[in-house]
Amino acid sequence: MTRTRSSRLPQQSSPDAIGCVGTILLLGCVIILLTAMFGKDKGHLVSVEAQDTSGPTTASLAVVSDTPRPTRTLPPLPTATSTGTATPTATWTPTATWLPTNTWTPTAAPPTEEPPTVDLTALLPTATYTPRPLPTPVGTISWTLRAPILMYHYISSPPEDADEYRLDLSVEPEAFRAQMAYLAENGYTTVDLYDLSLAIVDKKPLPEKAVIITVDDGYVDIYENAFPVLQAYGLKATFFIITDYVDRGAAPYATWAMLEEMANAGMRLEPHTKTHPDLRDRDQNFLVWEILGSQETLAAHIGYTPRYFAYPAGRYDDLVLQIVEQLDFWGAVTTAGGWWQGFDNRYEWKRLRVRHTTTMPEFIDLLEGGQ
């Protein structure tokens, strides 16, 4: 009998067992790797745990270990606060609001030569000077007197390039001296326009051989050439002044110091407007500005209100006559020729022009004419 040999071969590992072992080994490697990684960041986690005493879990530790990283970007925030500190420079608006430099227009208003557009007639009664009232005639009819009023302009030699007008208005100093000498040596008495007004309204005669000397514009030669001659012969004269030209120190006009010296010596200073314009076809404001303005300027320098006016270049119209009367002038002179003066024509008194070409016989005819 044969025995069957029962052979028991060793059991071989199944594929499932081998796969399980491999998985375990792989997990172990992963655990070792993770342990190494967490061990590297352990110091950071500990520092975080030290900050949080609430005992966060491991999962939360991983979150905490990541959140501090954004806080590393916070230091740039001071730049935001630095912009906050820069805001004062932005709020330094006072430099932008320094408007007084723009509002300082009063000095920029150039000063202008044009008269203001206000009614200047309100300025007529000036409180500084108390004007003497206009004399009125005795009775209903006033006298008309023969009174030659001589008219001069320049008392100097004309320049070589003088035009015909400048030449005609110029009387040589030697000729002027000869004319004044004739007056003094032949019994003439110089009076002024105030004397003429009082003689007319009081019906009193003027001195025998009375003559009135007037000089227009106010050039410097009246002080240099006319004034010394008048003083030398004991004569007086009336000077019509363009006041703005004197104010500005314009050449060739006299200065206020010169004119005041002449006034203190007995010479009369009367207004000839501010700027010597043509007064025709002007409005009331302009006329008051020119006429009253020159009158008040002179009053400030001579101490009384002057009462007589000379029309620039003899030009005027009806409105000018009305303004002169409303401004309480006592009289005004023209450039028209004539000898007889009265109350009714007191704003158009006539004068006798002495020219550059006037000879001594012609000068004598001016004095003796109109009889």
Image (cartoon, rainbow, N blue to C red):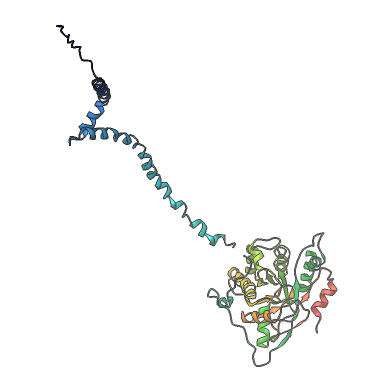
Name the residue furthest top. Answer: 1
Residue at screen point 17% across, 34% down = 55
Residue 243, position as x, y percentages in the image: 65, 67
The C terminus: image quadrant: bottom right
Farthest front residue in view: 1
In the figure, is residue 246 to the left or right of 181? left
| Residue 114 horizontal/vertical position (percent) | 63, 68
User: To which quarter of the image does residue 79 belong?
Assistant: top left
Residue 331, horizontal then vertical, whole percent: 67, 80
> Which residue is depicted at the point 35% across and 40% down?
77
**Could you tell me how many numbered marks the image carries?**
0
Q: Residue 183 sits in which quadrant? A: bottom right
Q: Quadrant of residue 10?
A: top left
**83 relative to 175 in the view: left or right:** left
Is 135 in front, or is 29? 29
Residue 341 spot, x, y in % from top left: 73, 83
The quadrant of the image that shows the N terminus is: top left
Residue sitting at the far bottom? 140
Tell which of 215 and 365 is nearer to you: 215
Nearer-the-camera pick, 272 or 155 = 272
